Image: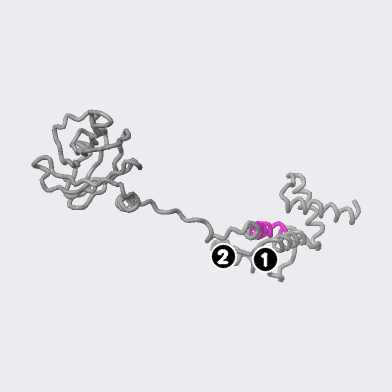
Amino acid sequence: MSKENTLNRFDELDAGRILGDLTSNETSEWQLLARDNENSNYIDLELLATELELQFTQPCDLSSSLSNKLADTIPAFSNKNKQKSATQIISILPWLGWATAACLLVLFNIPESSIPSAVPELTYAQKLDSLTKEAPETQRLAFSPASDPYNNISGEVIWNDERQEGYMSLVNLPVNDPTQSQYQLWIVDPERDELPVDGGVFDISSGGETAVIPIRNALKVFKPVAFVITLEQPGGVVKSKQEIVVALAKS
């Protein structure tokens, strides 16, 4: 193969290498030709591709990790005191990979600062506050103790029919052991059913603090007239015998 044909073949393979579509045999051929043509300017195509990309894109900030990586590798790459060899030609490929990554960041214009951060989940207390502010038709009923062991409890239930959303704000409700018993809420809605609707089971893990508990009604309720808290077996019950009634809130 003449020198001109050899150079043409090298340019053809080099273009394929930049595009990433060389076979393993073609990669081996490129390595041999790169060693035989070590005086060729083998990064002309990379520079041309980079220049074209930069002409038609807008600059953006690089991430700190990528900037540090480029800063660490550029001095070694630009050292002109080292002799060129085939192994040196291969050794610049990792640097070119990072350079390509930098160009892609510029090409797609996606600076790290533009990636949306996760919005923190609102606490139940914040959701309760939001419900009372955004929904004026929200119902608020005060809880009263229903038996002697719970004489010190207080609080209220907040419920909105349209949203089917509500919360209980409870103070001084005794801590329970979930392996032994759990609290369960019942919603009394005569327009729906003669039986109260399960409002969900819940636990109190620390005493003396205000506990905000979400209402998890199993069925829709339309005109609740009372909310009852009972103490039941772990996991709750389908129908309460109301052996231990803790608190009651009614209109």
Q: Position of residue 85 (x, y in %)?
A: 75, 61
Q: Position of residue 126 (x, y in %)?
A: 32, 53
Residue at the image point whose x is 45% and y is 53% from the top: 118
Badge 2: residue crowd in 10 Å (few <14, some 14–19, many ≥20): few
Residue at the image point whose x is 26% and y is 48% from the top: 212
Q: Is residue 250 above or below residue 129?
A: above
Mark 2 vs mark 1: in front: 2
Residue that mark 2 sits on: 68
Name the element at disc 2.
helix
Query: Residue 6 vs residue 91: left or right?
Result: right
Does residue 151 appear anywhere in the picture? yes
Residue at the image point whose x is 14% and y is 44% from the top: 144
Within the image, what quadrant is residue 4 found in? bottom right
- The front one of 111 and 223 is 223
Q: Position of residue 30 (x, y in %)?
A: 78, 51
Magenta residue span:
87-100
- The front one of 76 and 150 is 150
Could you tell which of marks 2 and 1 lies nearer the N-terminus? Answer: 2
Name the element at disc 1.
helix
Label 2 to label 1: alpha-carbon separation: 15 Å
Residue that mark 1 sits on: 77
